[in-house]
Amino acid sequence: MEDLWCKNRQDLGKRGEDVALEYLLRRGMKLLERNWRSGHKELDLVMEEEGFIRIVEVRSRSVPAQIDPLESVDHVKRKKTIQAAKGYVAANRSRIKGKEVVFDVVSILFNGELFKVEYVREAFAPTW
C-alpha cells in the first residue's frame, strides 16, 4: 500500500510540474532547468524572464486536500529551496550575470482531469 501511495504522489508531482511548466512557457518564460539537483535538494523549475531568474517551486495536491498547496511551502521548504538555489547560482554565475534571482510558487489543485493553477510571483524572499 505504501509503495502505491508513493508512486501516486510522484505521479501527481510530475503531472503538476508538467502543468506548471506549460503555464509558464505560455507566459513567455524560458526553461533553463527542470529538477536541478544540489545534493539531496532539488529545484523544480528554473525559468528566465526579462532580467529575472525565477526559481519556481511547484506544489500539487488532489481534491480533497488537507492543506492548500501554497500553504505547504513552509519555512523548512523555503530554506531547502534557498539552499539549492545557492548551489545553482554558484554553478551558473555566467548564465545569471546581471539578472535578479526570485522565488515563485505555482500551486496546482487537481480534481480528476480538471485542475486549478495559482501562480505567486516572488512568493518569498531569499536569505542569502
Image (tube, helix red, strand yellow):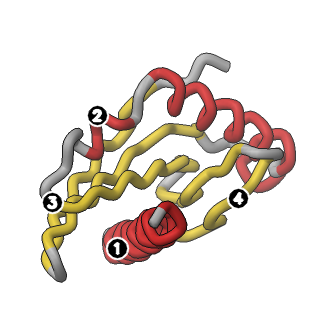
Q: Would you call the spot at circle 2 few (<14 residues within 10 Å), some (14-19), or many (20 or more)? A: few
Between disc 4 and disc 2, the foreground one is 2
Circle 1/circle 3 CB separation < 8 Å:
no
What distance separates the C-alpha of mark 3 from that of mark 2? 15 Å
Q: Which residue is mark 3?
A: 63
What distance separates the C-alpha of mark 1 from that of mark 2? 19 Å
Q: Amino acid at mark 2?
A: Glu
In the rendering, at what x and y percent does residue 127 appear?
A: 60, 17
Q: Earlier in the sequence, mark 1 or mark 4?
A: 1
Which quarter of the figure is the N terminus placed in?
Answer: bottom left
In the rendering, at what x and y percent does residue 115 appear?
A: 17, 70
In the rendering, at what x and y percent does residue 38 appear?
A: 79, 47
Q: Which mark is residue 71?
A: 2
Closer-to-camera residue (8/30): 8
Q: Which residue is mark 1?
A: 19
Q: Is residue 61 left or right of residue 63?
A: right
Callout 1: SS: helix
Circle 4/circle 2 CB separation < 8 Å:
no
In the rendering, at what x and y percent does residue 90 appear?
A: 84, 40
- Indicate whether 113 appears above or below 120: below
